[in-house]
Amino acid sequence: MRSYLLKRVPSALLVLALASFVVFVILRLIPGDPASTLAGPDAGPAAVGAIRARLGLDRPLSAQYVTWLGELVRGDLGPSYAIGGEVGELIGQGLGRTVELAVGALVLTVALGLALGVLGATGRGRGVRAGARAVATAALAVPPFVTGIVLVLVFAVALRLLPAGGYQSVLDAPDIGLQYLLLPALCLALPSGAVLGRSLQDGLERALAEDYVRTATAVGVTRRRIIWRHALPNALPSSVTVLGMQIGQLLSGAVVVEAVFAWPGLGMLAEQGVVRRDYPVVQALLLLLVAVFVAVQLLTDIVYAWLDPRIRWE
């Protein structure tokens, strides 16, 4: 396993290095000037130029990139241009809330994926299997911002069961925090749960068609034992890879969901950074998102290799 890790870590670091360059260049290609935004609509060219010089935006792009990368390696994300405060502190304040939302959504994703996958592959009767497929298709077809609005209208406005938006930490007040968490976590989990469910359904159907299942059935092993003790473990490795990819989707999808439910996490911070052309904030958030993708993918590969030893020897 150690040699397997040593082969994967350099490629992960290379992806991060390339991502830092792409993120830095793309932000500079987007129309809009942070200095003009900070100076205001009535400011003259001299005032805008002074701000550009103070922020270092008048230097060559290569020099700006090298400076930012050097500070990034030292763990210094620098000050925010427009929001105010240090970028590291701003991200630290929102990170815990976004992780809280993502963990809640991950729990619902696994539960929903297991239910849809098992019912879709083993449900008794065509109606059960067709219902599982219909739920998965609807969850994938409807975008999260539409799902979020529908959930608010049904559960917050019509039924008055849950709050329409806001935040309360689950750790500080579990009963109230779960009420605030449930709707945004469900909105975030629906498409990921559908993807996981379909992957698990395909894996279970392949496993149930294997010879060992027919042999076990012939010798009298119950169907429930065949599914949970034999078929499901064989279907899990490919679904673990899908789940790893969906964790990254959960974090990126949090940007939209946090805006719909007024959840004060990294998504709302990213929205503020983009609107105000706050380069340091947006750069750090995008690179953090890529780092999470890379870390989750690496962790997924390790779990996959642990479940299937043949991977380690390739």
Image (cartoon, grey):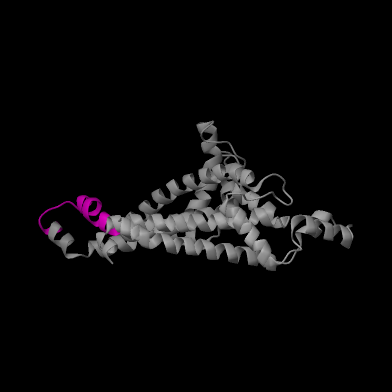
With 27 as the anchor, is 100 left or right in this view? Answer: left
Up/down of 93 relative to 119, above or below: above
Count of numbered circles in the view: 0
- Residue range corresponding to the magenta coloring: 217-236
Residue 294 position, x and y percent, is 46, 58
Q: Based on the displayed image, in which of its 4 quarters is residue 286 positioned? A: bottom right
Residue at 26%, 54% (x, y): give it. 233
Q: Can residue 135 be seen in this view?
A: no
Residue 4 position, x and y percent, is 33, 60
Q: Nearer the viewer, residue 201 or 7?
A: 7
Up/down of 32 relative to 153, above or below: below
Residue 71 position, x and y percent, is 61, 53
Residue 289 position, x and y percent, is 54, 56
With 312 as the anchor, is 162 left or right in this view? Answer: right
Is residue 160 located in the magenta-colored stretch of the structure? no
Prevalent SS, magenta region? helix
Q: Nearer the viewer, residue 208 or 89?
A: 89
Position of the N terminus, as image quadrant, is bottom left
